[in-house]
């Protein structure tokens, strides 16, 4: 451990004290610039995922000692394979969802439903801001309670059309 610390201090001294030498430029390129470029290309969620994976390994080692290392050794490769497959799965799911939306009714329905949602939200905000006083209704004016099945469909929702991806 001491040798590693001494080696790190020697490398830092060469880079700081003699920056124009070929060795210092090579060390700067390999130890600073290359990892910085790699980290710049890597997504934040990926770094967080791998950090969490390493953290789980450390916690399992601290809590369960040798058995934790054994279980983590069996678990880590499968989790890494799952993470790689997850990226591919998300892309395939996105393509299938896009195809399903375009095959059923297109983006027109999504636009109409989004507009209806925004209109409802604007109406509710205006109603709340217009009158802050509570209106008291008489118990007889409410009418019978409807079940969930009696509600009307969303405004602008077209009829269902079946489609096949095959």
Image (spheres, rainbow, N blue to C red):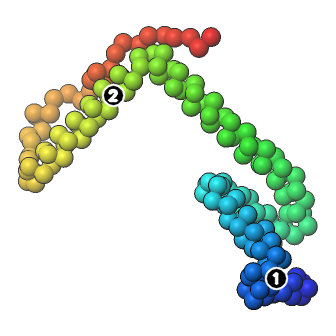
Q: Is residue 163 above or below residue 86?
A: above
SS class, disc 1? helix
Q: Nearer the viewer, residue 153 or 76?
A: 76
Q: Nearer the viewer, residue 70 or 52?
A: 52
Please name the residue that numbered disc 1 is placed on.
11
x and y percent of residue 89 in the render? 67, 34
Whole-number angstrom distance, CA of label 2 to CA of label 1: 59 Å
Q: Which mark sits nearer the N-terminus, 2 or 1?
A: 1
x and y percent of residue 82 in the render? 75, 43
Please name the residue that numbered disc 2 is placed on.
111
x and y percent of residue 66 in the render? 91, 67
SS class, disc 2? helix
For image coordinates 63% across by 30% down, the residue present is: 92
Which quadrant, please, contains the C terminus?
top right
Residue 144 seen in render: yes
Q: Nearer the viewer, residue 91 or 21?
A: 21
For image coordinates 47% across by 22% down, the residue present is: 101
Tag nearer the camera, 2 or 1:
1
Q: Within the image, what quadrant is residue 73 found in? A: bottom right
Q: Is residue 117 above or below residue 108?
A: below
x and y percent of residue 48 in the render? 64, 59
How many neighbours does mark 2 have within 10 angstroms: few (below 14), some (14-19), or many (20 or more)?
few
Residue 56 seen in render: no
Q: Are marks 2 and 1 in contact (CB under 8 Å)?
A: no
Q: Is residue 70 above or below residue 110?
A: below
In the picture provided, is 132 more to the left or to the right than 21?
left
Name the mark on residue 136: none
Q: Within the image, what quadrant is residue 142 found in? A: top left
């Amino acid at each position: 451990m001491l040798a590693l610390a001494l080696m790190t201090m020697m490398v830092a001294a060469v880079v700081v004290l003699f920056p124009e030498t070929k060795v210092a430029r090579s060390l700067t390129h390999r130890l600073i610039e290359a990892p910085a470029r790699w980290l710049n290309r890597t997504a934040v969620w990926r770094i967080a995922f791998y950090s969490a994976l390493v953290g789980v390994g450390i916690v399992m080692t601290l809590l369960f000692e040798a058995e934790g290392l054994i279980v983590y050794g069996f678990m880590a490769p499968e989790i890494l394979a799952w993470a790689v497959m997850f990226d591919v799965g998300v892309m395939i799911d996105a393509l299938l969802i896009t195809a399903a939306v375009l095959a059923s009714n297109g983006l027109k329905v999504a636009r109409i439903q989004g507009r209806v949602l925004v209109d409802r939200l604007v109406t509710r905000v205006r109603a709340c801001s217009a009158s802050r006083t509570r209106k008291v209704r008489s118990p007889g004016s409410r009418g019978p309670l409807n079940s969930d099945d009696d509600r009307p469909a969303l405004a602008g929702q077209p009829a269902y059309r079946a489609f096949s991806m095959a």
